[in-house]
Amino acid sequence: MSNRNKSRKGLFTVTLLTVMAIALTLAVAAVTIGTFQGGEVTIGGMASSTITYSSDNNADGSWTTTLTPSGVSDPWYARLEIGAGSFNGPAEITWQLQQNLGTWTDVGAAQTTNIVLSGDAENIYASSNGANATNYDWSAGVSAAGTYRVIVSVDST
């Protein structure tokens, strides 16, 4: 075999490898053109739920989505009002006080409620067992005037 034929075979091999590399790169690029995410799908989750507040913790009294206590040490309470058709089974509810400091910032330790949810409409209070009698007074976590809120996370156990 002449040197000229060897050069042609070498050139052909190099060209073939180059074309294959380019084709592979294009194929990979075509696969990763975009990644798209769908919205969340929640199965067995909460129907409608609202966090409401009260200054007197009266289970039958007036609970509202906003509250304006007169002073830092004035008591105030929170409850989670769960709509019918929600999760049915054991759950851990985490309650966290937050203060608006330009962004919502956690204040103090979270409170935890362990409870079995019925799937029916029910009110759960920020106590270890969800009962009104031992509902947590959120003023205990407030040290200065400001805007506060309670956020709630419900996890099945």
Image (cartoon, rainbow, N blue to C red):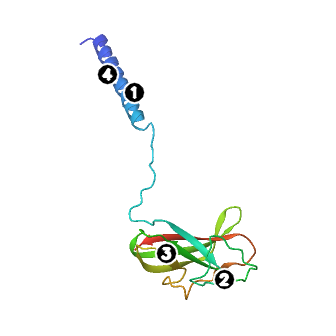
Residue at the spot 51% in from the left edge and 78% down from the top edge: 124
Q: CA distance from mark 1 to mark 2?
A: 66 Å
Q: Is residue 118 left or right of residue 63?
A: left
Looking at the figure, which quarter contains the N terminus?
Answer: top left
Q: Quadrant of residue 13?
A: top left
| Amino acid type shown at disc 1 | Ile
Q: CA distance from mark 4 to mark 2?
A: 78 Å
Q: Of the residues under marks 1 and 2, which one precedes in the sequence? A: 1
Picture disc at residue 56: none
The local crowd at label 4, few if under 14, some if 14 to 19, many if 20 or more residues have their Cα within 10 Å, is few
Horizontal and vertical percent for residue 79? 56, 77
| Amino acid type shown at disc 2 | Ala
Q: What is the total number of numbered labels drawn onto the structure image? A: 4
Location of mark 2 (residue) = 140
Tell me: residue 141, above or below residue 19: below
Q: Of the residues under marks 3 and 4, which one precedes in the sequence? A: 4
Verify CB contact (< 8 Å) between mark 1 and mark 2: no
Verify CB contact (< 8 Å) between mark 4 and mark 2: no
